[in-house]
Amino acid sequence: MTNTLALPRRDFLRATALGAAGLGLAGLFPAWAQTGSPGLLSTLPTLTGEDIRLRVAHSPFTVGGRTGHAITLNGVLPAPLIRLREGQNVRLHVENALDEDTSIHWHGLILPFQMDGVPGISFPGIKPRTTFTYEFPIKQNGTYWYHSHSGLQEQQGHYGPMIIDPAGPDPVAYDREHVIVLSDWSFMHPHQIISKLKAEGGYFNRQKQTLAGMLEGGPEEQMSPSERLMWGKMRMDPTDIADVTAATYTYLINGHGPQENWTGLFRPGERVRLRIINSGAMTIFNVRIPGLPMTVVSADGQNVRPVAVEEFQIGAAETYDVIVQPTEDRAFTFVAESIDRSGMGRATLAPRLGMSAPVPPLRPRPTLSMKDMGMGGMDHGSMPGMDGASASGPPGSMANMDHRSMAGMDHGGSAAAGSAGAMAGMDHGSSGAMSAMDMSGMNMRDKSLVPPSVKVGVGVDSIAMAPIDRTGEPGLGLENVGHKVLTYRDLVALTPHPDKRAPTRSVEVHLTGNMERFMWSIDGTKMSENPEPIRFERNERVRVTMINHSMMTHPMHLHGHFFEVVNGHTGSHPLKHTVNVLPGGKVSFDLTADAPGDWAFHCHLLMHMHAGMMRVVTVRPLDGDAA
């Protein structure tokens, strides 16, 4: 086990000078440079072996010239890299030096549920001034991470990377690797952030549409006046993409802000493996390296057939491994742009320390569409008042609307009169969008569209009328960027799954919320209301379909299991533990419920989970129970 210290300034300057002479001496340098120092070395402090000690405590944290309060492990942010090997046993002794309970969840690891680290579900938590020992065998390999599951400590710095090397040869060939931890940092206490969101759902949104913006006609102003009027009548904000934005966040890469230029080194011609972990509490990132293509080789720690891309969207708690092979003796900028494009994390890949490349400007912010409202599956071809030309319309237009699902539209009269009255006012223009449609007659909370088990009350502000499978889409704002962006349908497992059984049962999970009031739930019920667990029989094969009734992307995470994302590659569906469910969309996964115990299932946007978007998944019988 190693416990590295900050590099003294004199030695750091010497190391920087040596770095210019060649990379062969890089192994002589200490593994970590103090947070906030310029010209940062590329390795993280690392812990390894069968006995590892972690101390959770308060620490100052400096970024961008300001110092705030953090909760750290062993005094660093992110927490130390834990490096293990498949097949070993590990004991992780976690000392709590806080004055409140804490915990560690080993995200994506297959382990006994009592070691999963979720207070109130799998163990009681770690009391102040006590030590808890997690002990379990390592049954897998790949890129993972760990974080607190207590309160909002994850937002304050309580997270770190974990890499598990394979017991045998690695099917991915590479010469060098860098672990890249993406995260978001605010000097505002997370409880203050939630209070502000409760008072005003769009508190941190500084990119709302304005009259001045419309008159100026910038590239992000894509809506016609009639479309703006429609959204206004619905009292909905088409720019409500992220709850917490760069208005308060600094986006970090390995704990360093954009101005600090964290640098990962390479020799031209090397195959460099980037293990990218999104530890952001509330941020979905768009990742790209301008001028340097990426090949995705692993998703959530599981190997996939190589996919060449230039960009991908990574949800909170997802991990992707990519291979890059820079051939030129120059620097490249690593860009992690927030989904709402209010800010970015930035780092550098370069042959030598001190180098940098141009940092691209933020791209125009995206806006939500009717598809994001859950109308993507509605087919209007035979409806009165529809000109049919919108079949060539853009994503989110009326092109795919199926009005057999029009039960959700409350027009206040007969079905025929309602349809004609509402649809005749549609102005399709050149875009084919629902520009001038009078939405005032639409019942956006039609209970007939969901099962009776879904509670439709004040905490549910909309029910998707015709949600569609959006696994073939790259994510919000990435539809027309002009280069290849990863989709879930691009992912194919490298090796076939051993469980070939067809699912014997289907389960629907409805993701619900009230965006303006910042209320989040599953099936209309918050976790604090003690909903019934989702129950699976041990070793049962189940198809679970998650339906997103909100207009926000939800990265959904199931503890203790991997599931197969149903994406058309039968037998080789990608295995994941976290998956983005796009607004107004749905995602199905096939699950072999082979891990007995009680497991958390939740949105990994921390404050959505905290507000109630969480369930317990129960798998029975336990070991030792009667069959």
Image: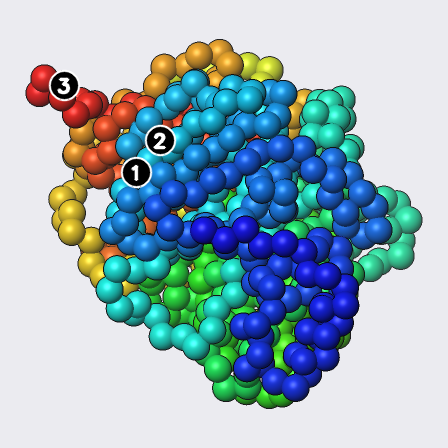
Which residue shows up at 33% across the image and 26% down it? Answer: 114
Amino acid found under the numbered disc labelled 1: Phe
Q: How is the image coloured?
A: rainbow
Label drawn at residue 625: 3
Q: Amino acid at mark 3?
A: Asp
Q: Which residue carries the number 2 mark?
A: 115
Foreground label between 3 and 1: 1
In the rendered image, which quarter is residue 93 located in? top left
Q: Is residue 300 above or below residue 333?
A: above
Residue located at (35% from left, 46% from top): 50
Q: Quadrant of the C terminus?
A: top left
Residue visible at 37% across and 50% down in the picture: 49
Percent across and percent down for residue 204 are 77, 37
Quadrant of res 5 = bottom right
Q: Is residue 99 left or right of residue 221?
A: left
- Residue 233 percent across, percent down from the top left: 73, 31
Of the image marks 2 and 3, the number of the one nearer the N terminus: 2
> Which x, y percent locates residue 275?
48, 61
Amino acid on which the number 2 mark rests in the picture: Met
Regarding residue 586, the answer to whether it shows in the image is no
Spatial distance from mark 2 to mark 3, Cα to Cα? 19 Å
10 Å neighbourhood of mark 2: few (<14), some, or many (≥20)?
some
Instruction: Please give the residue where the numbered disc 1 appears in the rendered image.
Output: 136
Q: Is residue 199 visible?
A: yes
Contact between marks 2 and 1 (CB within 8 A): the answer is yes
